[in-house]
Amino acid sequence: MNTVPVSIVIPNYNGEPILAKTLASVVEAVEAYPEESEIIVVDDASQDKSIPLITNNFPGIKVVRHNTNKGFAEAVHSGIKLSIHPINILLNSDVRPDRNFIAPLVRWFSKEDTFSVSPLILDQHRKPLRVSWNLGKIVRGEIRKRNWDLEDAFELARRDRTLKSLYASGGSIAIRKEMFFQLGGFLPLYKPFYYEDRDLCTRAWRRGWKTYFEPESTVVHDHQGTIKRFFPVKRIKIIKRRNRFFYLWLHLSTRKLLFFHIPWIFFRLFLRLLRLDIVYAMALFKSLFNLGEVIKLRGKLLQESTINSLEDIIEEIG
């Protein structure tokens, strides 16, 4: 199995209640990995005792501090900029990797066109989460996720079938640093959270750079991260739906946008208003407010040396 030096980057904001368990598992994984590695925690202006917890209990971990809270994307950018290795693994502060999770992930980077790799993500009860392997299909101008079975994934892997994925979750992803910066990293359009990882990997796919799923690498996601602890549920739903609009408007082909996606927007809006559900309407309004920026970004993407449309990518993934 090919191994290379790695940097592990962990964004943190007020993660004191969960950080110790995460860092202990990351340190154990680094000690089990035969190559050189480093751990970087980017503290995004935490107001709790995250920093003393790290410095007192994990002196070998590098700490980067933001004086003001800048959000997930900027924390990731700060960590990757300061990393010294070509392969970076991003982990949320509530993600605990298994001891031997690194080597299976990084072996994929022996392929020159590998951009990112996703591990098998388990919940607290060690049940597989669908976000580990992102398969999709386009239905009525929207992307619908396809279900998958873990045993089928292992069987395909045993038969040396590559498990391609539309994107890897930003909370547990191995990426090639050079490609990350060639893409410009996460787009500010998606601030403060959601869809920036999906967009990043889609932009990589459009250049011919691939994302894979590696079921032999395992992490546990406790779902105790920043978003649900510090943001109201309604606001989370609106931002997630707004960013979904952004993603589709950037990456769907013109034909899919005009003849499927846009007509169905009005139908879905009508149905949701009948149910007195204003989340969809508010998200759409906020999306339209940023339409000019989306159009500029879409034009820029079309001018770049992209070789795949979103429809092509989904077809290739299968």
Image (spheres, grey):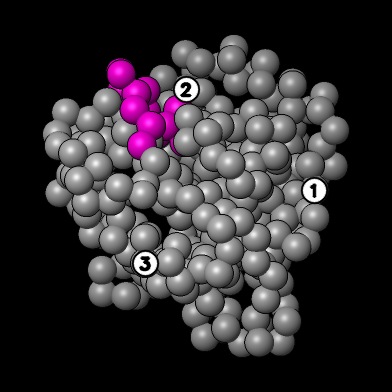
- Give left or right: position of 54 versus 242: left
SS for callout 3: helix
x then y, percent, for residue 132: 49, 63
- Mark nearer the N terminus (2 vs 3): 3
Q: From the image, which quarter does the C terminus lie in?
A: bottom right
Residue tagged by mark 1? 208
The correct choice, above or below, for 133 with respect to 168 in the image is below
The three-letter code of the residue at mark 3 reads: Glu
The correct choice, above or below, for 97 with respect to 195 in the image is below
The correct choice, above or below, for 19 with respect to 277 in the image is below
Separation of disc 1 and disc 2 at Cα?
28 Å
Between residue 193 and residue 139, name the one nearer to us. 193
The answer to whether any part of residue 116 appears in the image is: yes
The three-letter code of the residue at mark 2 reads: Ser
The three-letter code of the residue at mark 1 reads: Gly
Residue tagged by mark 3? 28
SS for callout 1: loop
- Mark nearer the N terminus (1 vs 2): 1
**For the image shown, how many numbered marks are present on the structure?**
3
Measuring 32% from the left and 75% from the top, which residue is drawn there? 126
Between residue 206 and residue 84, name the one nearer to us. 84
Between residue 132 and residue 48, name the one nearer to us. 48
